[in-house]
Image (cartoon, grey):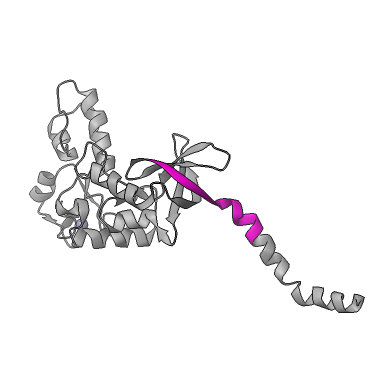
């Protein structure tokens, strides 16, 4: 008997590292019920211990509620996850201490679905995820969701614009404020360059474009006009 179990032990010994692997990485995934959706990229989940946690969806940025499609993005996120049990894979914490995570509802990757449907941008500043970028490019080409507007303002630029206009009394209020407009308003706040131009193809791109930081994209323009005056053409994909 003893030799028999010894042999069984040896036969399955290779499984132990696997068991260890899955045990060690298990806390990364946790299942919780969604009890709140604040906007297209932020939800609140309820843990088993009754504690609530706000989750910022990783790699995506949805329009702000005061932007076009902000409310629609929130509604769509709600239909995907509200009241449902989701799995969370934590990636990071943001500067506000919020948990940044992939969210799954069953087999669905919620972050990716929001980008696919045109209710969120790939948040390129914080993510290098190629599949999110591809989904955004496809949504833009198909004019889905927010991409019905050929020239939507990325939420990160919109937020920056709001901060800048708050710093310039009576300058620009509400609406869709583009960084180009702010630059033209002779703002005392230094505004970073918004467009990149490809020195070979002579096309220029918005920051949201998948080729914005391409190898030859070394020309930098503060406005659309600057780029055109320098002899550059707007990219057909990102419509700067
Ligand atoms: Zn482009």
Asked if residue 199 can be seen in this view, the reply is no
Q: Residue furthest top?
A: 169
Residue 87: image location, x then y, percent: 49, 53
Quarter of the image with the N terminus in it: bottom right
Residue 232, placed above or below residue 3: above
Indicate the position of residue 155 as horizontal and vertical percent values: 26, 42
Left or right relative to 150: residue 37? right
Quadrant for ligand 1 reads bottom left
Q: Is residue 83 left or right of residue 175?
A: right
Residue lying at the far front of the rendered structure:
83
Q: Which residues make up the magenta segment? A: 22-36
The image shows residue 5, relative to residue 166, as above or below, that is below
Q: Position of residue 125 (x, y in %)?
A: 36, 47
Q: Give how far across and how far down residue 161 sits, in percent.
A: 23, 34
Q: Is residue 109 inside the magenta stretch? A: no
Q: Is residue 35 magenta?
A: yes
């Amino acid at each position: 008997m003893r030799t028999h179990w010894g042999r069984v032990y040896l036969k399955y010994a290779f499984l132990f590292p696997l068991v260890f692997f899955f045990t060690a990485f298990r806390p990364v995934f946790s299942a919780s019920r969604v009890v709140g959706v604040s906007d297209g990229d932020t939800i609140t989940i309820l843990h088993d211990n009754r504690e609530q946690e706000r989750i910022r969806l990783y790699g995506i940025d949805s329009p702000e509620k005061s932007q076009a499609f902000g409310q629609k993005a929130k509604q769509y996120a709600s239909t995907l996850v509200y009241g449902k049990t989701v799995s969370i894979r934590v990636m990071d914490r943001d500067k506000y201490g919020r948990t940044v995570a992939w969210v799954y509802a069953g087999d669905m990757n919620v972050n990716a679905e929001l980008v696919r449907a045109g209710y969120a941008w790939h948040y390129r500043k914080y993510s290098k995820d190629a599949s999110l970028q591809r989904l955004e490019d496809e949504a833009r080409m198909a004019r889905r969701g927010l991409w019905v507007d050929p020239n939507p303002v990325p939420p990160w630029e919109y937020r920056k614009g709001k901060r800048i206009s708050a710093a310039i009394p009576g300058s620009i209020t509400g609406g869709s404020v583009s960084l180009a407009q702010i630059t033209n308003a002779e703002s005392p706040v230094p505004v970073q360059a918004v467009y990149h131009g490809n020195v070979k193809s002579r096309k220029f791109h918005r920051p949201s474009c998948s080729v914005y930081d391409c190898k030859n994209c070394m020309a930098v323009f503060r406005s659309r006009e600057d780029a055109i005056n320098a002899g550059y053409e707007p990219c057909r994909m990102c419509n700067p």
